[in-house]
């Protein structure tokens, strides 16, 4: 077991956690166990809430700022317009055609990464108070931009790759198209690592069972020491401490929020002594009638009996209904259950939704009375209908009827989908707005004058004359909508973006940008000169300032550069700056005189990684010299492979280069180099004899050693650490 002493904050995906607001130090709950913050099975339970609707209900119950679904707020969540960016990030809905709510983005990020949405919500509150805190208008955008505290180390400011609610969750791509994980997948990467991946110091990652000394923030909780030893109890705890490497206040607040909201796991059945039952759903209780128990085949015999006081700790949230699409008949008519709500339904909708009327269940007045009455159930989304006498056609969208204009009816080919139903039935359904033209349509109306708009993701994006020309549109491409009301019904979005690959400046400045992958990437004078870039367009500052900021365009791959404020040199590799030492410069055959010098402000804006890797088949040591006896390695196929001293001697391997340990720490580790097949070794610390066989070391029983004719004099005694580094195979017992 390793004992790792962490004395500084880790420069990973961390942020100073939201501190509890209190006039004096708060008491720490006796139930808090810093060694196990959350069970592994709960950490990965992606089914909580049942879908984005459940998350939305939860946010509304907490009066969260994230419950806002207005178009202007959704724009603040920074979901990119570029579907290729979303596809590259593994977004499950890159082509939805509209902006998603915070609840939808949280749900999708959980599904994509395998992380429980409850963990995301708790982190959003721990880091920026976005669930329970009142966020002022002037602080809102910054809070959203750093929602998960990702890429915001305690010891420095936030980075420039992940600002934006969307990017915090899903990650981002840089100007070269390289993908970087966001908060959700970063947490799961740590969780999925063998033994979990905890805080890192001195090149070692803590795992389950390791003891770690962590720094604390003192002052908000009573009796807290500056440092605290934690023994990591499971993989989820390892991941959370890697993300936020202190107990107080970060991970204690995580535990506090999680347990106050989600004490009993989703699906837990609790009941009072009078056999009134409830089911827990995301920190709330739903009444559980016997009708639903039978329909869902639930086991109420295993229900947890609670006191009225315990029950009151969970806010009521209506009743728990049977499975969706269950058809019931009550004294007042036919109904269909959706999300626990009873919706009146017509014979047409029953048939159109292919609901089986032969399986209609009777519903008593008593059970009917505890369910929330819903609106008339509409046909399924995407249905095109009109009345028998009224020729006006509608599209069912989100349970609302939206009017077709002559243009959208034709553009969407709606005639072949049209169904005719009674006028009085259409009158029962809510109607609002118009069917939006397809994405990519350029529209205007008589009242908009010469102002044209690009339809994108159910919004209209203003097109300035420069953008109109940049995107190659012609006057004949503009569609005149029938009425000003139809145009006004399309939510107004930010200005349209230029076409991919546009080089431009804006606002009369000399600074140049490249629009790529949905963002504007600054280009320093050094790169402009090196790449011979000439701007093609000049846009207004009021327009271009709305476009998302990307990271700076790097120099060409293979360029050796440094800042004018420092001496450290960097090599551009796959669009990222990788530091190079004198030994790496020599190893890679770089010309020392060819280093380019950039102003520090431009240099600091470039994406940076660890040290550059050496060339293929480099034999090296991280000792003080070639002959110092330090550890030997070979760099092959993108990984460094440790060479035990006895293997190096046996195979005649010697290092050609000396790299400092900090050079090699970021290089991926491969399996250690094996001795020749048939080599017999034994640890100097004792234990069985091993034989090298087909890429693995296999232990030998005494009987197997004798039966195979091995001799004790041929057994090499090797350091325990060298033997431990070699891959092991099955034991040989015969």
Image (cartoon, helix red, strand yellow):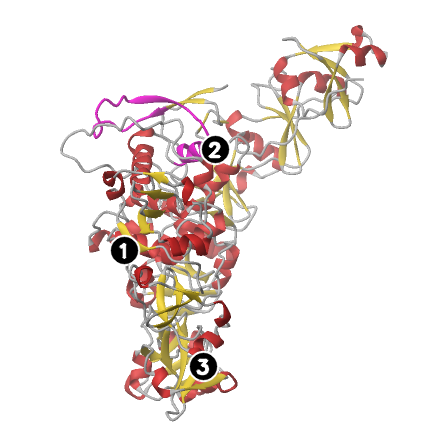
Any part of residue 523 in sight: no
Q: Name which of mark 1 and mark 3 comes first in the sequence.
A: 1
Number of the front mark, 2 or 1? 1
Number of the front mark, 3 or 2? 3
**Residue, x 27% and y 42% (percent of image)?**
311
Q: Name which of mark 2 and mark 1 comes first in the sequence.
A: 1
- Which quarter of the figure has residue 249? top left
Q: Estimate the x, y position of residue 324 in percent, counting from the top left.
A: 44, 62
**Label 3 Cα neighbours within 10 Å, binned few <14 / some 14-19 / many ≥20:** many
Q: Please tell me whether mark 1 sits on a helix, a strand or a loop.
A: helix
Q: Magenta part of the protein: which range? A: 214-243
**Residue, x 28% and y 60% (percent of image)?**
68
Q: Are marks 2 and 1 in contact (CB under 8 Å)?
A: no
**Label 2 Cα neighbours within 10 Å, binned few <14 / some 14-19 / many ≥20:** many
Residue at mark 2 to residue at mark 1: CA–CA distance = 32 Å
Q: Name which of mark 3 and mark 2 comes first in the sequence.
A: 2
In the image, residue 414 sits, relative to residue 43, either above or below, namely: below
Residue at mark 3 to residue at mark 2: CA–CA distance = 50 Å
Q: Estimate the x, y position of residue 375 in percent, counting from the top left.
A: 32, 71
Residue 218 shown in magenta: yes
Given the current orientation, which residue lies at the most extreme top position?
713
Residue at mark 1 to residue at mark 3: CA–CA distance = 32 Å
In the image, residue 604 sits, relative to residue 5, either above or below, namely: below
**Label 1 Cα neighbours within 10 Å, binned few <14 / some 14-19 / many ≥20:** some
Q: Residue 384 carries which label?
A: 3
In-image side of 483 versus 685 (left or right): left
Question: What residue would you read off at disc 1?
Answer: 60
Any part of residue 602 in sight: yes
Question: What residue would you read off at disc 2?
Answer: 235
Q: Estimate the x, y position of residue 401 in percent, counting from the top left.
A: 36, 78
Q: Residue 265 carries which label?
A: none
């Amino acid at each position: 077991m390793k004992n790792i002493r962490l004395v500084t904050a880790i420069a990973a995906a961390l942020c100073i956690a939201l501190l509890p607001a209190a006039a004096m130090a708060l008491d720490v709950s006796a139930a808090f166990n810093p060694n196990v913050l959350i069970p592994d099975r709960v950490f990965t339970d992606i089914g909580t809430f049942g879908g984005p609707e459940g998350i939305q209900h939860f946010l509304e119950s907490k009066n969260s700022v994230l419950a806002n679904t207005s178009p202007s707020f959704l724009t603040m969540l920074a979901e990119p317009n570029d579907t290729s960016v979303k596809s590259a990030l593994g977004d499950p809905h890159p082509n939805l055609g509209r902006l998603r709510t915070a609840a939808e983005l949280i749900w999708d990020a959980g599904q994509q990464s395998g992380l429980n949405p409850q963990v995301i919500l708790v982190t959003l509150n721990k880091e920026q108070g976005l669930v329970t805190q009142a966020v002022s208008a002037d602080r809102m955008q910054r809070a959203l931009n750093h929602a998960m505290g990702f890429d915001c180390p305690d010891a420095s400011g936030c980075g420039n790759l992940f600002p934006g609610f969307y990017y915090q969750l899903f990650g981002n791509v840089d100007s070269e198209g390289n993908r970087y994980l966001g908060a959700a997948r970063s947490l799961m990467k740590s969780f999925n690592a063998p033994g979990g991946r905890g805080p890192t110091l001195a090149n070692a990652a803590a795992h389950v069972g390791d003891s770690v000394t962590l720094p604390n923030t003192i002052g908000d909780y009573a009796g807290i020491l500056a440092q605290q030893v934690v023994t990591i109890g499971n993989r989820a705890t390892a991941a959370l401490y890697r993300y936020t490497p202190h107990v107080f206040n970060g991970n204690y607040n995580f535990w506090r929020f999680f347990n106050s909201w989600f004490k009993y796991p989703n699906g837990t059945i609790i009941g009072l002594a009078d056999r009134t039952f409830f089911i827990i759903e995301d920190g709330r209780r739903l009444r559980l009638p016997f009708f639903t128990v039978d329909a869902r085949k639930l086991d109420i015999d295993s229900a947890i009996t609670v006191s009225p006081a315990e029950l009151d700790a969970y806010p009521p949230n209506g009743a728990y209904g049977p499975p969706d699409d269950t058809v019931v008949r009550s004294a007042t008519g036919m109904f269909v259950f959706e999300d626990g709500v009873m919706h009146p339904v017509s014979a047409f909708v029953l048939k159109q939704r292919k609901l089986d009327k032969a399986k209609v269940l009777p519903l008593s007045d008593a059970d009917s009375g505890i369910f929330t009455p819903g609106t008339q159930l509409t046909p399924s989304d995407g249905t095109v209908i009109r009345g028998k006498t009224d020729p006006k056609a509608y599209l069912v969208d989100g349970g609302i009827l939206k009017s077709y204009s002559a243009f959208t009816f034709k553009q969407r080919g709606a005639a072949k989908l049209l169904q005719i139903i009674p006028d009085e039935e259409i009158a029962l359904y809510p109607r609002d707005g118009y069917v939006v033209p397809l994405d990519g349509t350029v529209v205007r109306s008589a009242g908009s004058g010469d102002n044209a708009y690009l339809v994108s993701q159910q919004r209209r994006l203003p097109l300035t004359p420069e953008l109109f020309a940049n995107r190659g549109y012609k006057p004949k491409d503009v569609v005149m909508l029938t009425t000003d009301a139809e145009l006004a019904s399309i939510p107004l979005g930010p200005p349209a973006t230029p076409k991919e690959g546009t080089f431009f400046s804006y606002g009369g400045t000399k600074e140049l940008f490249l629009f790529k992958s949905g963002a504007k990437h600054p280009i320093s004078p050094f790169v402009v000169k090196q790449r011979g870039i000439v701007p093609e367009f000049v846009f207004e500052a009021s327009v271009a300032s709305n476009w998302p900021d990307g990271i700076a365009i790097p120099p060409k791959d293979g360029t050796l550069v440094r800042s004018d404020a420092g001496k450290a040199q960097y090599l551009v590799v796959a669009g990222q700056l990788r530091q190079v030492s004198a030994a790496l410069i020599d190893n890679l055959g770089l010309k020392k005189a060819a280093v380019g010098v950039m102003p520090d402000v431009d240099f600091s804006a470039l994406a940076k990684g660890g040290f550059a890797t050496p060339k293929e088949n480099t034999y090296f040591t991280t000792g003080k010299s070639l002959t110092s006896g330090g550890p030997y390695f070979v760099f092959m196929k993108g990984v460094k492979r440790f060479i035990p001293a006895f293997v190096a001697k046996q195979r005649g391997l010697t290092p050609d280069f000396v790299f400092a340990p900090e050079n090699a720490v970021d290089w991926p580790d491969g399996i250690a180099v094996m001795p020749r097949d048939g080599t017999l070794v034994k640890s100097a610390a004792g234990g069985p004899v091993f034989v090298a066989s087909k890429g693995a070391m296999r232990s030998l029983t005494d009987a197997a050693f004798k039966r195979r004719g091995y001799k004790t004099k041929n057994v090499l005694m090797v350091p325990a650490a060298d033997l431990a580094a070699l891959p092991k195979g099955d034991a040989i017992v015969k």
